[in-house]
Image: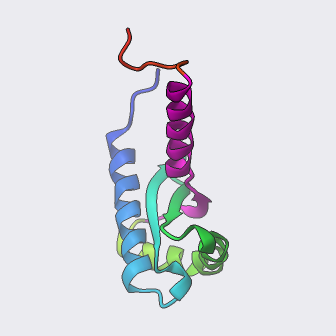
Amino acid sequence: MRKKSYKKEKFAERIQNEVNSILRYELNDKRLTFVSVTKVELSADFSQAEIYWDSFDREKRGDCKAALEAVSPKIRSLLAAKLAVRHTPSLEFLYDSQYEDEGTISAILANEKKEGKFNPDQE
């Protein structure tokens, strides 16, 4: 099992905070109003960053994705200025379906419990 790199975790956290800040205060695209970065995963050599995002408005997810793809180079440029590192990672924005998945699992478990197939209190 690989050890987690403290440096990598801190850099990913810093990217997450900076991208959230850029989305909130430096971009004027109304489609990005409710977009929030939930997680950042860096490649081993820090050259690529997968940025997971979510939107509070499900109906506008497609618009949010298109807006993120359109402003991705600008976000990378602003990020480069804020991070002040030699090489800024390339950015890939991916939708984070974690919260929807949790809702689906909860609904399945509730249905199973209602039908008597699942009892979380039993060990």
Residue 117: percent from left, percent from top: 55, 18
Residue 82: percent from left, percent from top: 36, 75
User: Magenta segment: does it hold 18?
Assistant: no
Residue at the limit of the structure toward the bottom, as seen here: 28
Q: Which residues are magenta?
A: 86-115
Taking the spot 57% from the left edge, 34% from the top edge, the residue there is: 108
Above or below, 56 relative to 98: below
Residue at the limit of the structure toward the front, as seen here: 115
Residue 106: percent from left, percent from top: 49, 38
- Decide which of 23, 99 is in the foreground and name it: 99
Above or below, 26 relative to 107: below
The quarter holding residue 37 reads: bottom left
Taking the spot 53% from the left edge, 88% from the top edge, the residue there is: 29
Above or below, 6 relative to 26: above
Q: Is residue 108 left or right of residue 123?
A: right
Q: Quadrant of the C terminus?
A: top left
User: Magenta segment: does it hold 97?
Assistant: yes
